[in-house]
Image: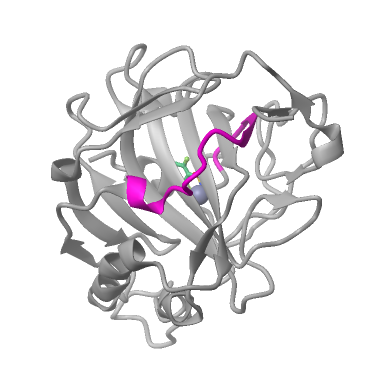
C-alpha cells in the first residue's frame, strides 16, 4: 500500500496554517469558479480500472481514514482525462465537517459540500513508488468527488460499517474486496481539472486534480459515523472528534481551471 505515513510523518499539528510552502504558486484546495473555467475540447474521458482484490485495509492516521490498496503492480489504474501517463491507485480518504453545512476542501462558486472524497493515484509510468512521485510535478492524480446529504449510499455502507473498528488514531483493520468505482458519480465525463498540491503536509505541488461535477449522495446517518471517528489515540486522556479535517482555501494565482464540458 502507498504508505502515506511518508506524507503524514511530516504532519504538523492540525491547522497550523499558514504553512510556508516552497514556491507556493499552485496550492490546493481552491474555489472552482464556473465562469473562470475554460472548456477544453481535447480533454478525454476518464478511464478507471479498479481491481477490488487490491483493497487491503482501513487506517485511521489521526487526520482522516484511508482505505489502502496494494500498489505494487498496475492492477488498479487511472488514465485518460487530462493525464498523459498511467496512474496507480494507492488510497482513498475523505474530508468532512462537524455538520452538514461545510466539510469539503474544494468549493464550486463558493458552494460548500458536507464532505469530499479523494482517490489518490501516483504516476507509475515515471516513478516506482508513491514516496518518489509525491515530490514530482506530475507525480500524483487525485480524483475529487463531492458528497451531499440525500439517499443512503449502499456501496459506502460496507465502509461505514467498518469505521467503529478504526475509531482511534493509528488503528488499522483489514478491509478487502472493495471496488471504489462504486463511489464515483454515474457521470464521470464532466469534471474540472487544474494543477495543485497535496492538501496535507508536505503540501507538495505534485497533484493533477480532477474534480467531478456531479456529487454523490450519502445519508445523514452515514456522515454521522464519519464524525464518530477520533483524531486521538486510545491512550490520550482527552478524546477529540475527527471533524473539520479540511485545509483552508488557497489562492488561484496564475492558474487556469479547465472543464471537460461546456
Ligand atoms: N488530501 S490529498 O488528496 O491532497 C492527499 C494526497 F493526495 C496524498 C496523501 C494525503 C492526502 F491528504
Ligand atoms: Zn484529501
Residue at 62 percent of width and 65 percent of height: 103
Q: Is residue 9 magenta?
A: no
* x and y percentages locating residue 222 in the rendered image: 42, 76
Image quadrant where residue 41 sits: top right
In the displayed structure, would residue 46 be above or below residue 34?
above
Left or right for 246, reference 31: left
In the displayed structure, would residue 8 be above or below residue 230?
above
* Residue closest to the far bottom: 237
* x and y percentages locating residue 24 in the rendered image: 71, 31
* x and y percentages locating residue 109 in the rendered image: 81, 50
**In this view of the protein, can residue 208 be seen by the observer?**
yes
Magenta span of residues? 181-198
Q: Give the camera-side residue of 158 and 227.
A: 158
Residue at 44 percent of width and 87 percent of height: 238
Q: Give the camera-side residue of 176 and 174.
A: 176
Residue at 39 percent of width and 33 percent of height: 121
Q: Give the camera-side residue of 36 and 261.
A: 261
Residue at 13 percent of width and 43 percent of height: 53
In the displayed structure, would residue 203 be above or below residue 153?
above
Image quadrant where residue 50 sits: top left
Quadrant location of the C terminus in the rendered image? top right
Q: Is residue 185 magenta?
A: yes
**In this view of the protein, can residue 10 be seen by the observer?**
no
Q: How is the image coloured?
A: one colour
Left or right for 149, reference 73: right
Quadrant location of the N terminus in the rendered image? top left
Image quadrant where residue 130 sits: top left
* x and y percentages locating residue 229 in the rendered image: 39, 76
Number of numbered labels in the structure image: 0
Left or right for 133, reference 38: left
Amino acid at each position: 500500500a502507498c504508505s502515506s505515513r511518508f506524507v503524514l510523518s511530516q504532519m504538523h499539528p492540525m491547522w497550523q496554517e499558514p504553512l510556508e510552502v516552497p514556491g507556493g504558486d499552485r496550492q490546493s484546495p481552491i474555489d472552482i469558479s464556473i465562469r473562470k473555467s475554460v472548456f477544453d475540447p481535447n480533454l478525454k474521458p476518464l478511464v478507471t480500472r479498479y481491481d477490488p482484490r487490491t483493497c487491503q485495509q482501513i487506517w485511521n492516521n489521526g487526520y482522516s481514514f484511508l482505505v489502502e490498496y496494494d500498489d505494487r503492480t498496475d492492477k488498479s489504474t487511472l488514465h485518460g482525462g487530462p493525464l498523459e501517463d498511467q496512474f496507480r491507485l494507492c488510497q482513498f480518504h475523505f474530508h468532512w465537517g462537524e455538520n452538514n453545512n461545510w466539510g469539503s476542501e474544494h468549493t464550486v462558486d463558493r458552494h460548500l459540500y458536507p464532505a469530499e472524497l479523494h482517490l489518490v493515484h501516483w504516476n507509475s509510468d515515471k516513478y516506482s513508488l508513491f514516496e518518489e512521485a509525491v515530490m514530482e510535478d506530475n507525480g500524483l492524480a487525485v480524483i475529487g468527488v463531492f458528497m451531499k446529504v440525500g439517499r443512503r449510499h449502499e456501496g459506502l455502507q460496507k465502509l461505514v460499517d467498518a469505521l467503529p473498528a478504526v475509531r482511534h488514531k493509528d488503528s488499522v483493520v483489514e478491509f478487502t474486496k472493495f471496488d471504489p468505482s462504486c463511489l464515483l458519480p454515474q457521470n464521470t465525463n464532466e469534471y474540472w481539472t487544474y494543477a495543485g498540491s497535496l492538501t496535507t503536509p508536505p503540501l507538495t505541488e505534485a497533484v493533477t486534480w480532477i474534480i467531478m461535477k456531479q456529487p454523490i449522495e450519502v445519508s445523514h446517518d452515514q456522515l454521522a459515523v464519519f464524525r464518530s471517528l477520533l483524531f486521538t489515540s486510545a491512550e490520550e486522556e482527552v478524546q477529540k472528534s475527527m471533524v473539520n479535517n479540511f485545509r483552508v482555501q488557497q489562492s488561484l494565482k496564475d492558474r487556469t481551471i479547465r472543464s471537460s464540458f461546456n
